[in-house]
Structure formats: structure tokens, C-alpha cells
Image (cartoon, grey):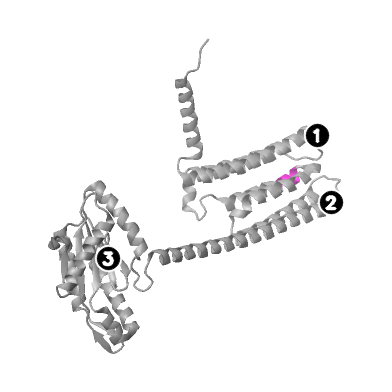
Amino acid sequence: MSVIGDKDINTLWGCCQRGVDHVLGTGKAMRIRTTQFLLATLLMLASVGVLYFMRTVGIENMGDVDTWAAFSCGGLVVIYVLIRSGFSLRMADPSLAFVQMLYAIACNAAAFDIAGHGRGVTLPILSVILMFGMFGLSMRQVVFVALYGLILFGVAAGYALRHLSTDEPVELFAAYIFMVFVVLSATTVLTWRLQQMSAYMRKQKNQLALAFDKIQQIATRDELTGTANRRFMLEKMRDEVQRADRTSLPLLFAIIDIDHFKQINDSYGHHGGDRALQAFASLVQGAIRGNDTLARWGGEEFVVLLTDTDMSVGLVCLERIRAQVAEADIAVGDKHFKLTVSIGVTQYCRGDTAENAMARADAALYSAKAQGRNQIVCSEALS
């Protein structure tokens, strides 16, 4: 007596997975398309099974079910080959959902004639076809499908009355066509309504996304200068301190203060002060690298966090900022004025805290002011 081991189970499972990959494909998009197609195939096979069952139990006046079944399943094979081979990728709809809908309704209309006295079963099948396919179509395609289905069933009913032997009254066929009209109309209206709801939900989602972005901007950005605010910078400092401790890469803390800012407000008004802050922030933002961070710390005081930067390189960068600010011409209406800045900078020490580093940079800033402003002082110069 043989025993199936784990190795045999794994081998069998691997074969099953390869088989599924071969049928459905390995790419996510391809799997979605082939899976949707297989659902449509199951519906068609169920319809074929119903007609064979009806023939087996002896429903009267049934047509050539075998030919109809071969034609229906053959068309599905062609559609599957187009999808699975990737040929359908050349088309606007790689899933061929619209083509599948038209083909399924045509087969369903043909079944209406073939089913004989059991032709009424085709109407629920039509409903299921529409339920599976309509919601993936555009509104124009939905209307086309509805008109197409109504015409096909009208032609099928006329053909049955004119060419097939049937003792069914004309009124019954009229009832069938009316039900087809009801089903198609209801599906069209429902699809239209769902598309409206979907569009409304997308609009609401976009509005929520915009509102969320605005809240994030308010929470992390200074409204006047567009730089990071104090809250954001505090979080950034903690992150960079942890990274510096982990990687031993250099990190600089610099505090920049606009000299005699009160005089600017007194001379040019608060509008002039705002303009000075905006011009300064723009100059500094253009002078630092993308991985450095500028934040408004409060009032006319700003903080720059220079990552992966030792003191010699940092001093060159800060001197460039000081010089560019001093050379800039700030315009408020027809008035022009100049700015200067004082800068205090310190190197982060491994195992230190952001608070201690900021305290050293702040002390260096006060030293720069005491020594005449418009200059840079680093914390090592205090010792």
C-alpha cells in the first residue's frame, strides 16, 4: 500500500499551479481578463446544459441544439484565444467585454427560436447576461446593446412565427418581446443610475483627497512662506537624528535670523515684512539641496537641516545663502530695500539630542548677532 508523502503533494500542487497559470496567465491584468471570460463561459455552458435538458425531457418543437451549442462554444474559444494570446491588447478593450456581450445576446436570441415551447427560459438567461456585462460598458455601449438585443429578439420572434412550426399564439410572442423590452430598458436605466452614482463617488473621493492634501499642507507648511513649519521640522529632526546615529553620516543644524526685521516692519509695514520673509524663503530654498530642509521656526527665524553634510561643506552652503540674501533687492511697490541675515550652525554629535544641537546653534546665532550681524558663527567657535 503506497502512501502519498509531502513531496508528492508539493509536486501535485506545483502541477496544478502551472496548469492554472497556463489557462489564466501569470500577469495580474491578464488574469482579471481571463477570469471574467471564464465566468461568461460558465454562463454559456449553463445555458447549453439547460437546452440539452429540455431536449432530454421532451420539450416540443425544439430545433438543432447540437449545432447551436457548437456555434456558441466555438465563438467562446475564438474569444479566449484572442484574449489569452494577447492579440486583444491591440484593441481599445483588451477584455473584449463589449464583443462578448454582443455575441452572448446573439446566441441567446438564437436559443429563443431553438428552445421551442421552452423558449421562455431564454429571458432569465438574457437577464443574467446583462447583469454580468452591462456594468463594465460605457453608456453609449449600453444603449447600443439594448437596441441590438431588442432588434435581435424581434427578428427571432418574427422568424419563429413565419418559418417555424409552432402552435403558440402571437400574443405569447408579443408578451415575450415586451418582457425583453422591460429587461433591456430596466438594465439600461439601472446601469445609467449606477454610473451616475459611481461618477458622484469619484467626485467625492477627489474632493476628499484634495481636502486631505490641504489639511496636510496646513499641518506641515507655513502658509506665508510655503516652507515647512515648526511641527514638521521637529519630526524631521527626530528622523534625521535617528538616521545619523544609525549611519554615522554628518548632520548640521543651522538657525538663520533676518537682521533688524522690526525695522523692516516699521518702515515698510507688515506687507513689507511679509514680502521680505517670502523673498528670503525663496532665496534659501533655491540655494539648498533637495535633501536639505528649510522651515520657518517662528517670526523671522528659520531653521535649515543639512543632511549628509560636514561642517566645511555646510559653511560654504550657508555662506552662499548669506551672500545671496545680502545681494538681493526686495521690492514692495515702488520701494526697494536690502536684507542681511545672521546664522548660527552646529554639527550634530552621535548620541546627542536634537534639542541640544538646536541649543548650540541658537547660542551661535546670538554670538553672530553680538559680533555685528550679517555673519555665520559655528558652535565650535564658542569654546
* Type of amino acid under label 1: Gly
Residue at image coords 81%, 50%:
161
Residue 303 image label: 3
Q: Secondary structure at mark 3?
A: strand
Residue 172 image label: 2
Q: Which residue is more in the foreground, 148 or 207?
A: 207
In the image: residue 346, left or right of residue 11: left
**Count of numbered circles in the view:** 3
Q: Which tag, 1 or 2, sits closer to the chain's start?
A: 1
Residue 58 image label: 1
* Cβ atoms under marks 2 and 3 closer than 8 Å: no
Q: Nearer the viewer, mark 2 or mark 3?
A: 3
Residue at image coords 25%, 51%:
244
Residue 67 visible in rendering: no
* Type of amino acid under label 2: Leu
Callout 1: few (<14), some (14-19), or many (20+) C-alpha neighbours within 10 Å?
A: few
Would you place residue 279 above or below residue 175 in this image? Answer: below
Estimate the x, y position of residue 210 in percent, counting from the top left. Answer: 47, 65
- In the figure, residue 343 lies in which quadrant? bottom left
What segment is highlighted magenta in the picture?
Answer: 110-114
Q: Secondary structure at mark 2?
A: helix
Callout 3: few (<14), some (14-19), or many (20+) C-alpha neighbours within 10 Å?
A: many
Q: Which residue is more in the foreground, 382 or 113?
A: 382
Would you place residue 53 above or below residue 348 in this image? Answer: above
* Type of amino acid under label 3: Val
Is 310 covered by the magenta stretch?
no
Estimate the x, y position of residue 363 in percent, counting from the top left. Answer: 21, 65
| Quadrant of the drawing holding the C terminus | bottom left
Q: Which tag, 3 or 1, sits closer to the chain's start?
A: 1
